[in-house]
């Protein structure tokens, strides 16, 4: 029986990270197409009241907070709803392991690693918005999805754009895959001025509305480097076939160059509901609710090469991608420590790439960047890299202002 949205049949969905920015966009889409989806589980870190409200709206079967201290608040907020409440990291993993048609994995950071792997083994389609899972353990995650017989659907706007352009073609036949970047708020800022950047400045992204962590990563262009590593694993292409093009208007989200000279591009508004809708409906289409793109209104599209001297974080991620093994995991861990310290006023903006570089050097020198054998090894490396980055932080911070 066709679902009201026009899909061939209704689909079951779980949403990991329901209270984040990706989660909010996904909730909007699920409510717009309520008859087309049944919601199995929703999870959050600790915002119990917000999660309970989402669970009630979506008529989810279970709601889970990772922070066990928020269990009482969640249970009280769900009282009388019939929705099961649970708490703790293992409860999040158990929720992710429930069989569904689609699991949207949107937990931010390496905290989402275990749950994402659980979803990879249970969901028919893994709509991946947790980039750290691919950055830290891309080969392992690909193996998990293949073993389950499922499919990975990229939810980041750039990777979703490439996925749509390829439309089933083997990416290895592409000559080049190009991810676009807005350039963030400091695209034309001098290095001297960038040393004076405060968190409130870096949180003003020119085109996208996102969470604090990813917004800072976009300001340093580390996010774009992480996306290159994602693309390397998602599409199975060599690092030298991946590149970044700065495109301030954020209208073109990805391009693919082919041997015949053709370059195919994906265009769309800067609205995360567009790629999420693509994943929720794949291989069909549903209305995203996004404003329709009017190119006559946009008028001008501009492009430039990224400045790797101004944005050292992008070069560091490219180098880590080429090095492979555990290097991307170390880079990601150091970056999370650095961004947290910057947001708390304990590290200058230009100290972010410095802390990443020194942590990578230290871990490499200690022989810590061999390929992790399993998820446990990934998590162990993540913890140790964070510990070392935290030790280096005071030294880096002192020279970052």
Image: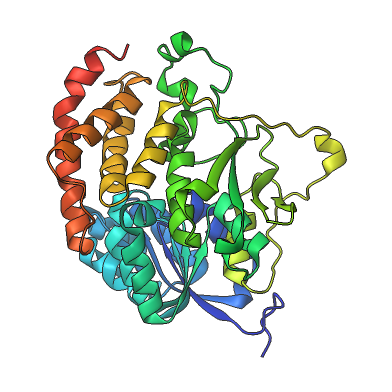
Question: In which image quadrant can residue 49 be found?
Answer: bottom left
Question: In which image quadrant can residue 3 be found?
Answer: bottom right
Query: Is 391 on the left-hand or right-hand side of 181?
Result: left
Q: Residue at x 24, y 36 (%)?
A: 360
Looking at this rendering, what residue extends furthest in the bottom direction? 1
Label total for image? 0
Q: Position of residue 32 (x, y in %)?
A: 65, 64
Front residue of 48/354: it is 354
Front residue of 366/157: it is 366
Q: Residue at x 21, y 58 (%)?
A: 372
Question: In which image quadrant can residue 317 be found?
Answer: top left
Q: Quarter of the image containing the N terminus?
A: bottom right
Q: Is residue 192 above or below residue 20?
A: above
Q: Position of residue 361 (x, y in %)?
A: 22, 33
Q: Is residue 75 above or below residue 395?
A: below
Query: Is 111 on the left-hand or right-hand side of 349?
Result: left
Q: Is residue 292 above or below residue 316?
A: below
Q: Residue at x 30, y 51 (%)?
A: 110
Query: Is 85 on the left-hand or right-hand side of 274?
Result: left
């Amino acid at each position: 029986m066709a679902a009201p949205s026009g899909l061939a049949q209704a689909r079951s969905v779980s949403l990991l990270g329901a209270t984040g920015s990706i989660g909010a966009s996904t909730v909007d889409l699920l409510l717009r197409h309520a008859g087309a989806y049944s919601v199995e589980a929703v999870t959050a870190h600790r915002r119990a009241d917000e999660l309970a409200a989402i669970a009630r709206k979506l008529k989810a079967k279970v709601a889970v907070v990772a922070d066990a201290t928020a269990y009482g608040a969640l249970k009280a907020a769900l009282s009388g709803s019939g929705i099961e409440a649970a708490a703790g990291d293992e409860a999040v993993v158990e929720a992710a392991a429930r069989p569904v048609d689609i699991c949207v994995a949107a937990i931010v950071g390496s905290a989402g690693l275990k749950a994402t792997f659980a979803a990879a083994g249970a969901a028919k389609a893994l709509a991946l918005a947790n980039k750290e899972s691919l950055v830290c353990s891309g080969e392992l995650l690909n193996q998990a999805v293949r073993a389950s017989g499922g499919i990975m659907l990229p939810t980041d706007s750039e990777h979703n754009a490439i996925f749509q352009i390829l439309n089933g073609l083997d990416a290895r036949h592409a000559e080049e895959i190009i991810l676009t970047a807005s350039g963030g708020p400091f695209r034309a800022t001098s290095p001297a001025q960038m040393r004076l950047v405060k968190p409130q400045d870096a949180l003003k992204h020119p085109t996208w509305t996102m969470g604090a962590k990813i917004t800072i990563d976009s300001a340093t262009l580390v996010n774009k480097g992480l996306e290159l590593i994602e693309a390397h694993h998602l599409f199975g292409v060599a690092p030298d076939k991946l590149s970044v093009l700065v495109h301030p208007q954020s209208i073109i989200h990805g391009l693919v160059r082919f041997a015949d000279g053709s370059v195919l591009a994906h265009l769309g508004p800067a609205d995360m509901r567009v790629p999420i809708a693509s994943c929720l409906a794949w291989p069909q289409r549903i209305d995203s609710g996004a404003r329709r793109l009017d190119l006559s209104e946009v008028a001008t599209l501009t492009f430039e090469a990224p400045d790797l001297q101004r944005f050292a974080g992008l070069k560091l991620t490219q180098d880590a991608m080429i090095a492979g093994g555990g290097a991307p995991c170390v880079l990601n861990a150091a970056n999370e420590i650095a961004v947290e310290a910057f947001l708390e006023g304990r590290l200058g903006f230009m100290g972010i790439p410095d802390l990443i570089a020194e942590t990578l050097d230290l871990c490499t020198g200690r022989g810590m960047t061999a390929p992790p054998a399993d998820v446990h090894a990934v998590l162990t490396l993540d913890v140790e890299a964070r510990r070392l980055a935290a030790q280096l932080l005071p030294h880096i911070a002192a020279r970052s202002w």
